[in-house]
Image: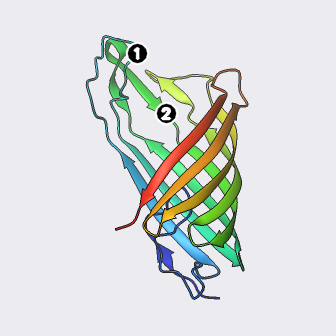
Amino acid sequence: MDSSYCVPPRSDGPRNCKPAAGGHLPTGTKVVGTGYFFPTGHYFEDRLLNLGSNRFTFRPQLGVVHNWGKLSMELTGSAWIFTDNDEFWNGNLFEQDPFYTIQGHLVYTFQPGLWVSTGAALGRGRQSTLNGVLKDDQKTNVGWEISGGYPITPKLGVKVGYIGLRTQENVGADLDNYVLGFSLLW
């Protein structure tokens, strides 16, 4: 088994790693990465609704990819870790527990750049505390996706897909998203 580490993973698989012969990642490739989200924009503590969250978020990830010819399976676990917002509405302190996610994808590659994918995900956590009082607002979400990629040129590709998300709690959002994206290699 050949293993390597790639930083960071991408949403359509860790394709930034050096592929083995045949254009696929080595079997058993481990993927480690992290995302950083910064508080940007204007935040007004006297307003309940703001576009920003006035806190930092960190997202460490660990994943693995296993290949069987043109079919690959990807499994990733993440933890979304939030700092406190000590300037929440009218001077309150807002804290939130980590949000843990696990997601798996099956990807079939017809040729480099031409692929289809399906996947599922589960996330749980994010229970809030306001001024030290625990709120009953833990989130549990189930998601799924189907997508495909098509090479327009050797350096330009298009991705189309659908992402569904359903909350498993009394509060939360049920979402249906359609995705259109372009990838440019240089």
| Residue 178 image-quadrant placement | top right
Q: Foreground: 155 or 7?
A: 155
Whole-number angstrom distance, CA of label 2 to CA of label 1: 17 Å
Please give left or right for residue 114 compared with residue 118 in the image.
left
Label located before the other in sequence (2 or 1): 1
Please give left or right for residue 180 compared with residue 52 in the image.
right
Q: Pointer 2: residues within 10 angstroms few (<14), some, or many (20+)?
A: many
Residue under circle 1?
A: 49
Mark in the foreground, 2 or 1: 1
Check the picture and name the quadrant holding the C terminus.
Answer: bottom left
Q: Is residue 135 above or below residue 167?
A: above
Residue found 52% across the figure and 37% down from its top: 97
Residue 98 at x, y = what percent? Answer: 53, 42
Q: Pointer 1: residues within 10 angstroms few (<14), some, or many (20+)?
A: few
Residue 27 at x, y = what percent? Answer: 64, 81
Check the picture and name the quadrant holding the N terminus.
Answer: bottom right
Looking at the rendered structure, the secondary structure element under dot 2 is strand
Q: Amino acid at mark 2?
A: Gln
Please give left or right for residue 168 compared with residue 17 in the image.
right
Residue 121 at x, y = what percent? Answer: 68, 48
Residue found 65% across the figure and 51% down from its top: 147
Residue found 56% across the figure and 63% down from its top: 13
Q: Is residue 49 above or below residue 33?
A: above
Q: In this view, which residue lies farthest toward the front? A: 153
Q: In this view, which residue lies farthest toward the left? A: 42
Q: Foreground: 128 or 113?
A: 113
The circle on residue 96 is 2
The circle on residue 1 is none
Q: Are marks 2 and 1 in contact (CB under 8 Å)?
A: no
Looking at the rendered structure, the secondary structure element under dot 1 is loop
Q: Amino acid at mark 1?
A: Leu
